[in-house]
Amino acid sequence: MISVYVHADHDFQMKSALERVSMSEKEMEKYIERTNKYRSDFYHYHTGRSWDDAENYDLCINTSGANIEDLVKVIAKLVK
């Protein structure tokens, strides 16, 4: 098993999310906060660890401004 943590800076998250979903910026801020809290709680419940601690993963990738297809290729090479 290889664990990968995929993250992006706040501005990139907002821009990307607002391109896909019709919400106000304020609504999106709340949505992202809620979603990240859920992810953090879920991860902690099942592992006893912190979701956003890089030491818990084999690979951490910042997707801010990155080409997703290229990142998929990098991960696929790592798995092989």
Image (cartoon, rainbow, N blue to C red):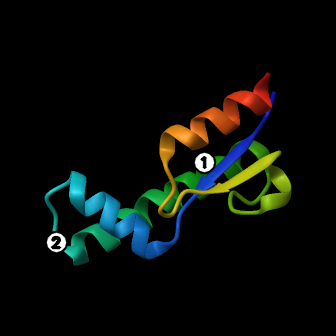
| Residue 32 location (% of width, % of height) | 39, 64
- Labels 1, 2: front one: 2
Between 35 and 7, the one lying in front of the other is 7
Residue behind mark 2: 24
Query: Looking at the image, which residue is at 58% across and 59% down?
Result: 7
Q: Amino acid at mark 2?
A: Ser
Q: Earlier in the sequence, mark 1 or mark 2?
A: 2
Answer with left or right where residue 2 lies relative to residue 28.
Answer: right
Query: Looking at the image, which residue is at 50% across and 60% down?
Result: 36
Between 27 and 20, the one lying in front of the other is 20
Q: Amino acid at mark 1?
A: Phe
| Residue 80 location (% of width, % of height) | 79, 21
Q: Residue furthest top?
A: 80
Residue behind mark 1: 42
- Tag 1 secondary structure: helix
Query: Looking at the image, which residue is at 51% across and 56% down?
Result: 66
Answer with left or right where residue 25 lies relative to residue 30.
Answer: left
Q: Quadrant of residue 75?
A: top right
- Tag 2 secondary structure: loop
Q: Within 10 angstroms of label 2, few (less than 14), some, or many (20 or more) residues?
A: few
Answer with left or right where residue 73 lies relative to residue 26.
Answer: right
**Residue 66 position (above or below residue 30):** above
